[in-house]
Every structure is written in structure tokens, then in C-alpha cells.
Amino acid sequence: MSDPSNVLIRFLNVDNEFAERLLAVARRKIEERCSAEVVTTGGARNVLDFEIRPGIGAEGFMIQDPPSGAIRITGNDERGLLYGLGRFLRCSHYDRDTFTPGTRQATSVPEKPVRGIYFATHFHNFYHEAPVKEVQDYIEDIALWGINTLCVWFDMHHYKGIGDPDARLMISRLKCLLNSAKNLKLSTSLVFIANEGYADSPHQLRAE
């Protein structure tokens, strides 16, 4: 028998791969805050439908909360669905035993086409040293607030060439972070600076 406190999520005309990613984000954010479970079948008191319908405005969303029936988040595109989910989650209420969905209807379209964040992935800070899963969860969190671009830096001076084992580990780490952003349909970029070099670069090539 289905638990009425669960949250039933349904997808309409949403790419299966992105639907799975959105479902995983919703499940993590709801289930880490209360005992309600996010399900895709069966009955539930709380029903949340996602659909894509162009015409709202680039990366925009609309949340409809009819007196009876499912709450519907409509995105102009996939990013719009993600941002709509973020708004819905922030307006909802979480107790240990219950989840109360946000009931505020909303329509929102970003004013700026680029809303980015730079991760300073060097100097042994959080982005450099934290477990990859923690940083990936953080990427999801800020994406729910409307970020659409992630930028990271491969800081060459930490390493003695591209073959340095530590350099290879950092490249693998950056790939994981950038792939997490791409899975959420965010834009990504990798930054270098023109006068940077590896730790063992020839001294005669360095600026005085």
C-alpha cells in the first residue's frame, strides 16, 4: 500500500535522461530533510508534474497549484524545469515526518543570459580538497538557485607537467565536477592564464 505522505513525481514530454537527473535531485533534497519518499508510481498525497512547454521565455518556469490535483512545474526548457524545482523546494516545508509542498504560484524568467560561478579549484580550498560528492551536491544546490554556468581552473603551477600524478588526479576531479554541471544542462568552461607555467618550467621562460 502506498504511503500517502510520499511525493509522486511524473514527467510529461521530458527527455528520459534529464528526467532521471531531475528526479535524483528532488529525491536527495526532500529525503535528506524529512521521512517522505519520492516515488514515480503508486498513490501519494503530494503529486508533482513536470513538463516542457516553450513560450515562457528562455530558461523560465511557471508553477501552477490548482485547488485540486497535481502541482505542475512547466519549464520553457530543461533549465527552466531545474530552476522551477528549486523554487518549489525552497517554498516547501519539511518536518521530520511530513513534507508540505509549497503552494505559491509563480512565473519567473531570468533577466541575464549568463549567471555563472567560478570555482577556484586550487590553493587547497573546499573546491580543491573536499570529497568530490560534496562538491557535486553543492553544484546541484547552486543550480537550483538559477546558476547556468560553471567555470573551473586547472592551476598549472601546482604540478610538474601534465604527466604529474597529482595533475592527473586533478584533471579527473575537474572532469567529474564539469560532468555534474553538464548533466544538469549547465554551461561549463575551463580557465587558464597566459603567463602561467608548470612548477618545473624553464626559468628563462618566466617573467622577471
Image (cartoon, rainbow, N blue to C red):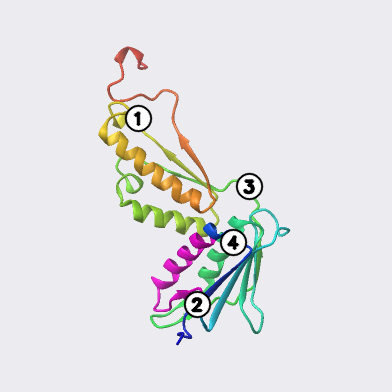
Near mark 4 (Cα within 10 A), the count class, few <14, some 14-19 or many ≥20, is many
**Image depth: mark 4 or mark 1 in front:** 4
Cβ atoms under marks 1 and 2 closer than 8 Å: no
Q: Is residue 152 left or right of residue 15?
A: left
Q: Residue at x 58, y 64 (%)?
A: 84
Name the foreground residue: 109 vs 78. 78
Q: How many marks?
A: 4
Give the foreground label among 2 and 3: 2
Q: Which mark is residue 118?
A: none
- Element assignment for label 3: loop
Which quarter of the rendered picture does the N terminus lie within? bottom left
Foreground mark, 4 or 3, reads 4
Q: Is residue 122 visible?
A: no
From the image, tell me which residue sits under label 2.
7
Q: Amino acid at mark 1?
A: Met
Give the camera-side residue of 69 and 148: 69
Q: Which residue is mark 1?
A: 156
